[in-house]
Image (spheres, rainbow, N blue to C red):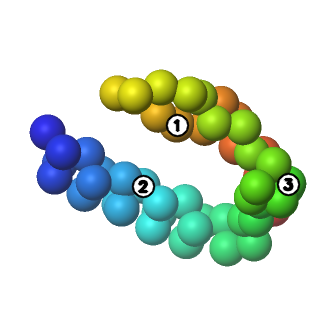
Amino acid sequence: GQNLARAELEIALHSLFERLPTLRLAAPADEIPFKPGDTIQGMLELPVTW
């Protein structure tokens, strides 16, 4: 589970940044909303620009 998910994420992010080298956050990092929760956490949205 967890190790596979981390490996998949690493491959996906590497591919994404390789294809879109100018990819950047479109908002300050401290303004990105997070989903509250104890077991599952994550961003509600991730605004980017390239």
Mark toward the start of the polypeptide (2 vs 1) = 2
Residue type highlighted by circle 3: Ala
Amino acid tagged 2: Ala
Q: Which badge, 2 or 3, comes first in the chain's sequence?
A: 2
Identify the residue shown where x is 72% and y is 65%. Answer: 23
**Mark 2 lies on residue:** 12
Left or right: residue 35 versus residue 21 is left
In the rendered view, tell whether residue 25 sits above or below residue 41: below
Residue at left offset 55%, top offset 60%: 16
Rendered residue at 63%/36% (across/down): 34
Instruction: Give the percent coordinates (x, y) of residue 18.
Output: 55, 71
Residue 1 visible: yes
Where is residue 26 drawn, in percent x and y?
A: 85, 55
- Closest to the camera, between mark 2 and mark 3, is 3
At a point 75% along the width and 72% down the height, the residue shown is: 22
Task: Say which quarter of the image contains residue 27.
Answer: bottom right
Quarter of the image with the C terminus is bottom right
Quadrant in which residue 24 is drawn = bottom right
Viewer-proximal residue among 46 and 42: 42
Q: Residues within 10 Å of mark 1 (few under 14, many from 20)?
A: few
Please indicate whether residue 47 sits to the left or right of residue 17 in the image.
right
- Which of the labelled discs sits on residue 42, or is there none? 1
Q: Quick one: label 3 or label 1, which is nearer the N terminus?
A: 3
**Nearer mark to the viewer, of 2 and 1:** 1
